């Protein structure tokens, strides 16, 4: 299997929107009373993604498997966390894979990429947020050295009340 990550720019917003909607829809529609219509519009519209892609602190990558786009990655390069300054901390904000790309070693490849990038930028910590009901991703992150260090509740309209919890996880490099 050939896996690669391709850095993208503002001009790729429509392509990213397409992939993001598919990957998100594969896993998270059950969290919403409206089948995630509100969240998808807010988060993955071309206009919103153009703004996010224009942020010089954010890096976006399309994840390819055998030259097929199967997901995307968003990193916030300078993202202060706890006692770590923005110069020392990197946030893994989003890693979404299509359902058909799960359990194929792609996540392993992406995590190695994230850790290598963080080290190359002299980061000492990588942190993320994950749904507290997402047992698969939580196990995956723990396997890669992350530990739960906090929690929060999302306050999105039309999100089901019982699935608003998130864990904050960190990995010291």
Image (cartoon, grey):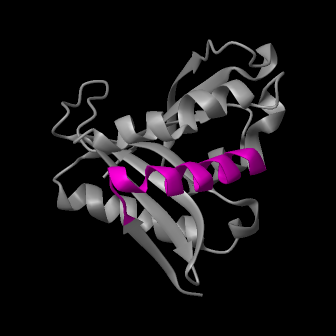
Report if residue 106 lies within the magenta region: no
Position of the N terminus, as image quadrant, is bottom right
Report if residue 13 lies within the magenta region: yes
Q: Residue at x 57, y 57 (%)?
A: 143
- In percent of width and height, residue 163 lies at 76, 23
Query: Is 58 on the left or on the right of 137, as rendered?
Result: left
**Total tally of numbered discs in the picture:** 0
Query: Is 35 on the left or on the right of 168, as rendered?
Result: right
Task: Give the main secondary structure of the magenta stretch.
Answer: helix
Q: Residue at x 35, y 44 (%)?
A: 53
Asked if residue 127 can be seen in this view, the reply is yes
Judge whether 13 appears above or below 105 on screen.
Answer: above
Query: Is 140 on the left or on the right of 4, as rendered?
Result: right
- In percent of width and height, residue 62 lies at 47, 63
Q: Which residues are magenta?
A: 7-26
- In percent of width and height, residue 30 lies at 83, 34
- In percent of width and height, residue 10 lies at 34, 49
Q: Quadrant of residue 118?
A: bottom left
Q: Check the image and name the residue furthest to the bottom.
A: 1
Judge whether 159 appears above or below 139 on screen.
Answer: above
Q: Residue at x 69, y 20 (%)?
A: 164
Q: Residue at x 84, y 21 (%)?
A: 33
Asked if residue 145 can be seen in this view, the reply is no
């Amino acid at each position: 299997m050939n896996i690669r990550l391709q850095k993208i720019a503002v001009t790729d917003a429509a392509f990213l929107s397409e992939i993001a909607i598919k990957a998100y829809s594969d896993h998270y529609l059950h969290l919403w009373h409206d089948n995630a219509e509100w969240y998808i519009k807010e988060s993955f519209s071309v206009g919103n993604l153009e703004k996010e892609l224009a942020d010089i602190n954010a890096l976006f990558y399309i994840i390819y498997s055998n030259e097929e786009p199967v997901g995307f990655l968003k990193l916030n390069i300078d993202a202060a966390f706890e006692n770590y300054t923005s110069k020392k901390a990197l946030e893994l904000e989003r890693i979404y894979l299509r359902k058909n790309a799960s359990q194929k070693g792609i996540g392993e490849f992406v995590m190695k990429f994230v850790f290598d990038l963080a080290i190359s930028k002299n980061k000492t910590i990588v942190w993320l947020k994950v749904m507290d009901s997402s047992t698969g991703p939580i196990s995956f992150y723990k396997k890669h050295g992350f530990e739960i260090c906090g929690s929060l509740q999302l306050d999105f309209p039309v999100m089901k009340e019982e699935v608003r919890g998130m864990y904050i996880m960190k990995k010291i490099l």
